Image (cartoon, helix red, strand yellow):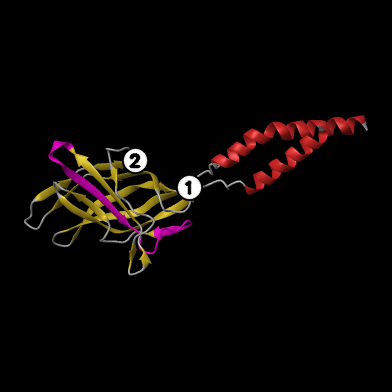
Amino acid sequence: MKSILRLTAAACALVGLTAERASADIKYTLENVGLGYVAWGIQDAGTLNGWFITDDGQTALKDFHFDAPQVTVTNWLGQSKTFAAASYNYAPPDSNDLSDLGNTTILDIPAPYIKLTQPLGALRVTNELNLLFLGGLSATGTTSIVSVLSGEQQSRVGDRFVTGGYVRASAVAAVPEPSAVAVVALCAPALLAYGWRRRGTASAA
């Protein structure tokens, strides 16, 4: 019995060492992301706020929330037009995720982007949010958002583009891989029994 427990404990320790590591998602928070509208110069069109979460390889969008404010601007004819407040949330069909964080390049330079569309009622008009990160997303520190090519389109009003800003990365609490959880569940009783057996042997000595 003692030999069996010893072998089981050793096997569990070995499997535990080879189990897949825990994965830590990455949260990116928008900072100083201004929006502009072009007509007789660049007009202030508000600030885009929000965050998004990717896997630790920065290839999959796992959660997000973005808010663009209501802002009134003036078009080329001197007429007022109002961008409605818009929220993009990870809750289809509230927002449709057409992003590509893993494979897109521009002139062989990594160019991951977030593209979200938001259907508005029965007329099939949509809002659309685009954020481009030329050079790739950094797992630490900040990553700049490409100006002009990034922005929001509201089909009833027009476009307001990103004038500047960046995202800041921070780690989300690690989640154990299923294999690691299975090792703990299967091996914990054996390890406890082995420890109890050794304790009893030491006490008898």
Q: Residue furthest right?
A: 205
Q: Secondary structure at mark 2?
A: loop
> Which range is magenta?
121-143
User: Which circle marks residue 10 in the picture?
Assistant: none
Measured in 3D between alpha carbons, the distance from the residue under mark 1 to the one under mark 2, in whole angstroms, is 16 Å
User: Which circle marks residue 25 in the picture?
Assistant: 1
User: Residue 188, how many percent across, how many down?
Assistant: 68, 34
Q: Nearer the viewer, residue 152 or 95?
A: 95
* Residue beneath disc 2: 90
Q: Quadrant of the N terminus?
A: top right
Answer left or right for 197 relative to 73. right
Q: Residue furthest left?
A: 77
User: Residue 19, how many percent across, how many down?
Assistant: 61, 46
Q: Please name the amino acid that badge 2 sits on.
A: Tyr
Q: Please name the amino acid that badge 1 sits on.
A: Asp
Q: Quadrant of the C terminus?
A: top right
When the figure is inspected, residue 3 is found, relative to residue 97, above or below; the finding is above
User: Residue 151, how many percent across, how many down?
Assistant: 26, 54
